[in-house]
Amino acid sequence: MIKRTIDISDPAFLHLKNQQLLIDKGSETVATIPIEDLGVVLLEHPQIVVTQAVVVACQKNNVALVFCDERHLPYSLLLPVSDGNVLHNKILRNQIEVTKPTIKRLWKQVVIHKVRQQIATLKKAGRVTVQLDRLQGKVKSGDPDNVEAQAARQYWGLLFGGDFRRNVDEPGINALLNYGYAIVRAMIARAIVGGGLHPAIGIFHKNQYNGLCLADDLMEPFRPWVDWLVYSLALGTEKELEVNRETKAVLLGLPSTPVQYDGRKMPLMNACHFLVADFKRCLEGVSLKFFYPEWDSQLDLL
C-alpha cells in the first residue's frame, strides 16, 4: 500500500474521528484521511492545532510527524520508538553490540552507493563524471580517506556551477535542498523505527544531540535524488527558487516515486522498508551486503 505524504501549510485544527484524520479550517472540515493511509505529515504553520488523539494514532500507525520552523522548513520529527517491532529489545541489542569491522564495512557501502547516485545525477544533467568515477573505486572500509567529502567538493560545482556553495542557512536552492532532505530523512526514520531499530544509533554519524543518526547515515545515497529534483526545478525558471506550494509539491512526491528494488517495482517509501530489513540482516551477521533501490526511468521525465 502506498502511504501518503501530506503538507499542511495553513492554519488548521487536526482531530480524530473513527480513525480518520479530520483537517478543519475555520468551521469547515476540508479533508478527511484514514490514519492508516498516512506515511509522513508535515505541519508547517504555527497556528496548526493537533489533538493528543491524533498524535497517538499517528504513532500507533508509524506516521512520521514533522514540525516546521518559522522559515517553513522541517525542524523536528516525532516517531514511535518501542512499538515498531515486537522484537525491539533483541534487535536493539544487536544494533548496540555490532562490531567495528561490520560498522566500517557498512559505511563503505553507504559511501559507494552515494557516489554512484551522484554520478547518475550528474549524467542526467549532462555533466562529465570522470572525477567521481575515479573516486568511487577508492572507497575503503570505513572511508578513512573521506572519499565522501572529496566527491562532494567535485559534485556540487559540477551540478550547480562553480559559484554554488552548500549552506543550510541560505535561501533559494539551498532552502529547497533542506526541505527535500527533511522529507527523505523522515521517510527513512519511519522505516528504521518500523524495523525495530533505534534511529539514534548510527554507524557514522555520532552526534550525541542527534536523535536520528542512523537515518542520517542511511539517507545519504538518496540526497542526489533530491538534488536532481531541485536541479530540474532550477532549469525551469530564471528566478531564484523558493520554498512554495509549487516547488514543495515536486519534493513531496518523492516518497511515492516508483523505483526498482530487487527486480520489483514499488514506491520509494515501500522500498525503504526493504532497505532497512537488508541493513538489519547485516547488523545481525546474516548478510554482508545491503542494497539501495534504483531510479525508475519515469524520473527521467522530471
Image (cartoon, grey):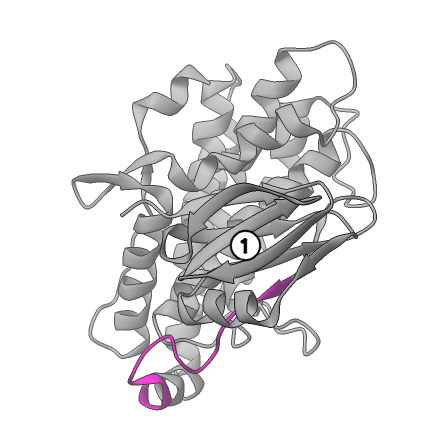
- Pick the front one: 224 or 163: 224
Q: Which residues are magenta?
A: 77-90
Please state which amino acid type lies under the numbered disc 1.
Arg
Name the residue nearer the viewer: 100 or 80: 80
Residue that carries the numbered disc 1 in the rendered image: 185
- Asked if residue 27 is positioned above or below residue 244 in the image, the reply reads below
- Label 1 environment density (alpha carbons within 10 Å; few <14, some 14–19, many ≥20): many
Q: Position of residue 113 (x, y in %)?
A: 41, 47
The x and y percentages for residue 231 are 60, 23
Q: Residue furthest left?
A: 263
Residue 291: % across, % down? 29, 52
Give the residue at x 75% y 27%. Answer: 242
Q: Residue at x 60, y 72 (%)?
A: 52
Q: Give the main secondary structure of the magenta stretch.
A: loop
Q: Quadrant of residue 279?
A: bottom left
Which quadrant would residue 177 be assigned to in this image? top right
Q: Is residue 85 magenta?
A: yes
